[in-house]
Image: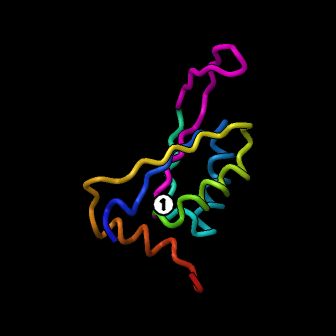
Amino acid sequence: MNEKDIFVALTTCPDAETAERLARELVEASFAACVNIVPGLRSIYRWNGATQADDEVLMILKIPRDRLEAARTRLVSLHPYAVPEFVALPVSGGHHPYLQWVVDSTRTPGR
């Protein structure tokens, strides 16, 4: 395992309850090792030809490369937005024991 095998993925949710529900689903199903939920986000964006502004909650997911596509697919299937954000960034300069924990935490029996 090297640090490039770990990704940090970002998504937003309309509220904390939705974010917690999604986070629990992703962690309990071993798609993500950890999900941080950050309240207090204000998003300004274009949607349907107009500028929109909404309060949102940011989710920060820690995912190994081999679970990334499955995590994206699962998140999109559960997400209330028509076009949910899912942006994955490779880790650089991570603490090796933590990165190993990410990998180990997403292993389920039979995987």
Res 2 quadrant in image: bottom left
Residue drawn at the location 63% of the way across and 24% of the way down: 54
Looking at the image, residue 77 sits to the left or right of residue 96; the answer is: right
Image x and y of residue 33, in percent: 49, 64
Query: Which residue lies under the disc numbered 1?
Result: 63
Looking at the image, residue 54 sits to the left or right of residue 42; the answer is: right
Looking at the image, residue 43 sits to the left or right of residue 64; the answer is: right
Which part of the image, by quadrant, shows the C terminus? bottom right
Disc 1 residue type? Ile
Extreme residue toward the bottom, this view: 110
Mark 1: few/some/many CA within 10 Å (<14, 14-19, 20+): many
Q: Principal SS element in the magenta part?
A: strand
Image x and y of residue 9, in percent: 49, 49
Image x and y of residue 27, in percent: 58, 64
Q: Is residue 60 magenta?
A: yes
- Where is 109 relative to 4, above or below? below
Q: Is residue 28 magenta?
A: no
Number of marks drawn? 1
Res 13 quadrant in image: top right
The kind of secondary structure element at disc 1 is strand
Residue drawn at the location 30% of the way across and 70% of the way down: 97
Image x and y of residue 8, in percent: 44, 51
- Where is 91 relative to 107, above or below? above
Residue drawn at the location 59% of the way across and 22% of the way down: 45
Q: How is the image coloured?
A: rainbow
Q: Write the start and end of the magenta stretch as one range.
A: 41-64
